[in-house]
Image (cartoon, rainbow, N blue to C red):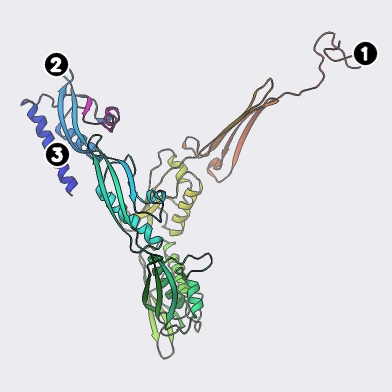
Amino acid sequence: MNKLLWSIIFCTLAVTTLQAQDATAWFLNKPIVGFEFVGAQAHSTQELSAILAGYKDKPFTYDLYWEMQNRLYALEYFESVQADAVASDDTKTSVVIRFTVKERATVLKIQYQGNDNISEKDLNDSVLSKVGNIFNEPLIRKDADAIISLYKSKGFLDTSVNFEAVKNAENNSVTIVFKVTEGPKSTVKKVQFSGNSFASEGTLKGLMQTREPALFVSGDFIESKLQEDIAAIQAYYSEHGYVYALVEKVDRQIEMNEEEKRKYILLTFYIKEGTQYIFGGVTFSGNKVFSTEQLAAYFRQKSGDIFNSKKFKEDSMNMNNLYYDNGYITTQIKPEEKVDEGKRQLAIVINILEGDRSHIGRIIIQGNSKTAESVIRRELPFEEGDVFSKAKVMRGFMNLIRTGFFSQQSLIEPQPGSAEGLIDILITLEEQSTAEFEVGGTIIPGDFPFSAYANVKDNNFLGTGVTTGINLSVMPTQQSLSLYYQDNWLFGKRLTGGVSISFSHDVVQYVPQDILGPVFNGDEDWAAPDPYN
């Protein structure tokens, strides 16, 4: 909000400055023929002019200036920007916009103090600030938190980090100094349990990442792993009928060893196991689209089995997908637990509020600057108007990733369509390089003093989805060239076909020749090869 306010203030002042240049505002509606930048040191006039190139030759207006001003501020290079209109010649038929800027400081160095246990390289990898970047104090505060997190992941729970920005006015730069107070390292001395009768201490320890020091085990205490351990213990109990088992608290007893500068922690997990329940079966309410028999077939547990929460959740998800894969994505499915404490039995009623069937509205594809849309659409097992299927949408996404044309950062997102019952599919792609280039060679003695090869291949040639390549090899006794083409979608079907053309030239050495006269037939008793004629 503050940044937006300052931008508005600067833009207003700049427009006022332009108006103050000449009461007649001669520059209005004159074509812009160029840009000048005064005060820019870290960024060249050529670089900055290229950013505004789209405004060149357009008639100057205050609205257009507002756009240019916002474009420059969006770069986050400048603290302030002021503009003046300068006539390109004496006739004032065109205008040059001269921007007077005050650049933000750049990061000259990043230094660390007090980091005895973590290398400077690892610290550099953990922070977002980099040498050469624009100085950004809020980002540096996040970097300090990132350094603390890195230390905590190594067992240093009491680490604190402060920073100092040392400014150099001469070159408008800043040296960032992170001052680290590491504190003692925390090590697990012992792990013990209270309240566990069903699960043994050895079983529970085997579930945990937090461990006592041993051979190949450091024993470092990591806070985030402790929370994962609590979740793992509760999950284990819930898979063995103890649905409401709980780790009520974890007690920590700390012993400080000043000589070793290390904290030793005794951890005690207090567990409330509760009752072990057997499965009382599953029933359904509200299902009309699919029969009770169809839905019940998804559940592997039988009445009388020890209840397994993990298995039940997996089976419920598979049952839910029956609806979602057949277009009923607005269907609401809510399991309800029915507990009989006397029988120690847990039954489940699944309440279903079925919605209408949904269809695919638009398929929106973005981010494909190279790959043709037809190449993308052919990988999708669905079209506009089809019944929406979660499974088909996910299969289409995996098909796109398997082409190798797009990175794992690509996304496919169902969104509400233009009308009720329509679902738009938004596919946001991040293309990656599909070209391969390999070259090599050696120098050898002789009449032909080198050997070389070059292989060029593109798996998405010109965005068409076909593979093309060239292999070239040059050696003293052999030269070859091969061209190949492969299409995995022949005639619009998943059929693979291709063609390869090769050329080669071989030099055969030490074979007798007869090209100088007289030339013999070869069956004369006195015939001899060149040069013995």
CA neighbours of label 2 inside 10 A, class few (<14), some (14 to 19), many (20+) = few
Left or right for 393, reference 87: right
Where is residue 454, by image quadrant? top right
User: Cα distance, mark 1 to mark 2?
Assistant: 99 Å
Left or right for 175, reference 186: left
Q: Which residue is mark 3?
A: 10
Magenta-colored span: 33-52
**Which percent across, then down, holds residue 97?**
19, 27
Amino acid type of disc 2? Thr
Residue 50 located within the stretch drawn in magenta:
yes
Is residue 414 positioned above or below 296 on the image? above
Q: Earlier in the sequence, mark 2 or mark 3?
A: 3
Please, what secondary structure does the residue beneath circle 2 have?
loop
Please, what secondary structure does the residue beneath circle 1 have?
loop
Q: Earlier in the sequence, mark 1 or mark 3?
A: 3
**Which percent across, then down, holds residue 490?**
56, 41
Q: Which residue is mark 2?
A: 91
Amino acid type of disc 1? Trp
Between marks 1 and 2 in the image, the one whose residue lies nearer the viewer = 1
In this orientation, which residue lies closer to the viewer: 343 or 72?
A: 72
**Which percent across, then down, holds residue 403?**
50, 46
